[in-house]
Amino acid sequence: MAGRKKTAAQAGAELRLALVMMQKDEGPLLDSWLRYHERLTTPDLIHVFDNGSTDARTLEILAGARARGICVNTDFPTNADYQIKNTIMVDHIRSLQAAGCDFVIPLDCDEFLICKPRPDQVSFRPDVLRKVIAGVLDLSGHFTMLGSYYNALGAGHRFHLAAERHVCFGRSTVTRMDHGYHIARTDEGSKHQIALAVLHFQSKRPEIGKRQATEKLRKRVADFSRETLLAYSGPGAHMRHWFLPKEGAGPGQVPRQRGLPEFHKVMKAVGAPFPFEMFFDEDRYPQSRAETADDPYLAGAVEQGLTEKEALLIHKLCREAGRVLFYGPQMMALSVARTGAGAVDVLCLSKTTLGRRLPDAALRAEPKVKVTPVSLRVEVDGFGTPKTPPPRQAVLAYVERAPDAQERPVDVAVVNGRYRVACVASLVLANPQALIVIPNFWSRAHVHAVLKFCGCVDTEGDMVVLRRDPEVPDDKLRRHRDAHLRDPR
């Protein structure tokens, strides 16, 4: 009969629900996110902004998404674009509203949309979720969800609910939104709560969480010292915990958890196994551990100050590298030469340190290791630190010597000697694809200056693995190098 009002189920079925998300190099998590949300709306209403992914698996997933009709936008590939993510999203949400979308929800790649039709119920059913949304379309203003179900590290289907605001939009035009999607405004200023929530997989393995947090914060904070992080309250401040030791944690502070096994069933049904390995502790180095089981050099490296896991990460990165460079003598140079690396070069400022860390007998046993003594033309102490300021040209010759020493490019460099920031800047100028490993990194804020021109690839304990940030031009890199030629740390 003409003019009859649609039922809630009919309105839900006809709902034009758009989902928008920005990501970079999320790999298997991105695949799970896409497959999960393709249940909830049509592919053309899922809009993914790729923030400059380079990971091969991620690029493959994005290509498959395009083939299925998902909108993949690659117009915002830089870290500077990420810093204004909220502005980009506001503009895009406004365009979707103008194009006739009924409801638009911004999400992150670790957030999976669910609904709570009743206070004691969580539903993964698309028809129930769409009906919930259809029931509020006549309301003006914007909406906030009931909260986020945070995952429990090491427990695949257990979550705890936190009353975290998360905004979404109906037909009132969005005018502003913060970077974390917690606060918003529309041209009609009212606000309503909607019976939606997200599963938020924020608790990841430490090295994954720390790497992602580094990438999101490194151009927002001066360094990652405790003092700097505690004083920071801008976008991404919730990620500071990856760098701050937990204090006062006790049994009474553990939130009440809830099992949601249906999530497993949904992911199995869509044919995209969820990457739970990101959220469980596991041995990342089984092959390196097996290859170095009887390696006296790796044990010696641990005695010299590395943790076992840090030593194993260096081994894993170097075992198939063509050329490995060590700024400063370290026992790990012998270990990686013994178990697979091609050429291994060591630069040394102190004969005392060289004799202590790389004994002559061990060097004779590993001919692939080439040690090059370098002089700063002033007296240095037993650790290679100059006792008086050396000539600028002598320091420049040291930091530039390794990249220019051979025609073969550096694949991996372990920077643990003097003038670390200047050495890293010089290295990535000549070897933009090289992996840069810096032990004793997070505990030394003065070295964090390298994060102004390098991105974080991996972490382990107090060590970081970096690669050149392609957004930083050569002239700026030279300025960073030159500014640190007087800093021997």
Image (spheres, rainbow, N blue to C red):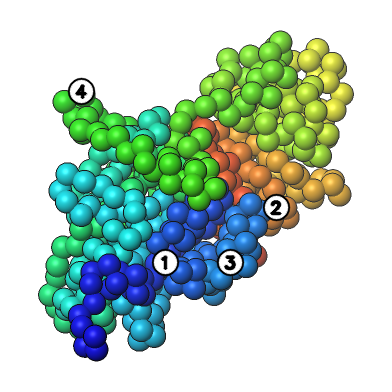
**Nearer-the-camera pick, 69 or 479:** 69
Q: Is residue 117 left or right of residue 126?
A: left
Circles 2 and 3: CB atoms closer than 8 Å = no
Question: Which residue position holds label 2?
Answer: 433
Is 85 rendered above or below residue 387? below
Alpha carbon separation for disc pair 2 and 1: 40 Å
In this picture, residue 436 sits left or right of residue 111: right
Q: Amino acid at mark 1?
A: Thr
Q: Quadrant of residue 243?
A: top left
Task: Check disc 3 and report the residue beneath it.
Answer: 68
Q: CA distance from mark 4 to mark 2?
A: 45 Å
Tell me the amino acid under the disc marked 4: Pro
| Name of the residue lying farthest toward the bottom | 2
Residues marked 1 and 3 touching at CB (< 8 Å): no
Q: Residue at x 36, y 41 (%)?
A: 262
As drawn, is 469 to the left or to the right of 112? right
